[in-house]
Amino acid sequence: MTGGADLNIEIPMKILSDEKGYLDRQCPNENCLFEFKISMQDWEDKVSDEEVHCPLCGQIAPSDSWYTYEQLDAMQEIATNWARNYMLGEIDKMFGSLARSTRNNKYIKITYKRNRPVTFVNNPIGAKEEWNLDITCEKCGTRYSVIGSAYFCPCCGYNSASNVFDNSMNTITKMVQSLDEMKASLTEQFDMDTAETMCRSMLENSFGQVVSAFQKFAQCRFKELSGVEKRVNDFQMVDRGSKYFFDETGSSYETFLSSDEINRMKLYFQRRHIIEHNTGIVDQQYIDKSSDTDYSVGQRIVVKIDEALDLIKIIKKLSSWLLTLT
Ligand SMILES: [Zn+2]
Ligand SMILES: [Zn+2]
């Protein structure tokens, strides 16, 4: 009977952390392949073998599927070296014993001389340089690090509404603040008209981005406080959102913002609405709802950088107050 003999080989490999003690990981989802870092200690102590969550796309996969391409390449190289070393060793043994067994044979003479000793060097697999943005999960305490932003904790999958909100607000703020620079470089790359149109559109979109980030944040915050899940769009109406929080906690938006700030917030929310739903062209409904005296029906809303920054300031102020509610 000849059966295939399984050769079960285990090659010890060591993957190193970076200077901060973080381990490189990569999402196995082909559409994502997001790279992140996680504290080596938390990876060993906290993360389960069955379920690891991708911080960006939320994919769940067993813990042995998160090697980065670099780590897989390095492991492949180690395995190849090991195999080459193993084969040379076997050849050595084979010809060595053949040479020995034929030593006294007068018809056949086999001599075998090793060319050079092969040594198997198993270097630890290194890590990429450490990154700046460190996150600690509010729920399970797992420490991880990403470039850009993250939505899920790799250990427990917790989606931190306030983290996501902070990240979006910072990104939008930087985008709005750098619009003049962007316009200059876009003018060089394209032309003045294209640059102007692109920057105007980014500025107009910033209203929508701020409002939708706030709506999502307010919805999550309200759910944390009341256990009730309202529709995201309920927080598009300033008065309605404010009333929800008032009924639940006794504090409304008016508790934290001046009436002037509330009025500007309402105006900006209405402008966002007309930008998104009527390409910015003022209609009677807008005039009725916003009491905006700067525009008449048929005109187009013009968004200014100062207004976008003012909206961001009001929203940041309100949201940090909402976080203090209990
Ligand atoms: Zn992913
Ligand atoms: Zn967590």
Image (cartoon, rainbow, N blue to C red):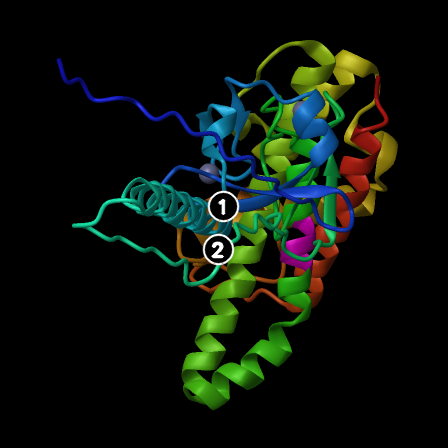
Circle 2: is it few (<14), some (14-19), or many (20+) Cα within 10 Å? few
Q: Residue 260 carries which label?
A: none
Q: Is the residue under label 2 in contact with that under label 1 (CB below 8 Å)? A: no
**260 vs 197: above or below:** above
Can you tell which of label 1 and label 2 is closer to the viewer?
A: 2
- The magenta stretch is 169-173
- Left or right, 117 with respect to 319, comes to left
Q: Tell me how far mark 1 sits from mark 2, CA to CA.
A: 29 Å
Q: What residue type is labelled 2?
A: Val
Q: Position of residue 104 (x, y in %)?
A: 29, 44
Residue linked to disc 1: 68
Q: Which amino acid does label 1 sit on?
A: Thr
| Observer-nearest of 107 and 210 | 107
- Using the rendered view, name the quadrant where residue 24 is placed: top right
Q: Which residue is drawn at 40% across and 52% down?
A: 278
Q: Residue at x 64, y 39 (%)?
A: 164
Q: Where is residue 153 in the image (x, y as percent from the top left)?
A: 62, 30
